[in-house]
Image (spheres, rainbow, N blue to C red):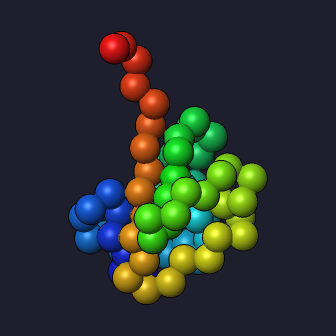
Amino acid sequence: MRVVLNGEPAEIDADTLDRALAELGYGDAVVATALNSEFVPAPMRGEARIAEDDRIEIIAPMKGG
């Protein structure tokens, strides 16, 4: 399905946020996620359903200051 991933168009097969992370290669990476501008905590990603044209944001922590 077509989604917007970090501001760019993308095609994914996943129907939940946790499956999308696995499909996109994030696996067990420590990241913050949002679906349609709403923060999704890690324990809730399996319940966060993705639909056509949804906006997914994946943010990895950065070191430094």
Name the quadrant of the N terminus: bottom left
Q: Does 28 appear above or below 48?
A: above
Name the quadrant of the C terminus: top left
Q: Residue at x 55, y 57 (%)?
A: 39
Q: Does 34 appear above or below 14?
A: above
Q: Looking at this view, name the residue that lies furthest to the left.
A: 8
Image quadrant of residue 47? bottom right
Q: Looking at this view, name the residue that lies furthest to the top.
A: 64
Q: Does 23 appear above or below 42?
A: below
- Residue 23 seen from this side: no
- Residue 27 seen from this side: yes
Closest to the observer: 37 or 3?
37
Could you tell me how many numbered marks the image carries?
0
Q: Residue at x 32, y 57 (%)?
A: 6
Q: Residue at x 64, y 70 (%)?
A: 48
Q: Residue at x 62, y 76 (%)?
A: 49
* Percent position of residue 18, x then y: 63, 60
* Percent position of residue 33, x then y: 52, 53
Q: Looking at this view, name the residue that lies furthest to the bottom.
A: 52
State left or right for residue 10 relative to residue 35.
Answer: left
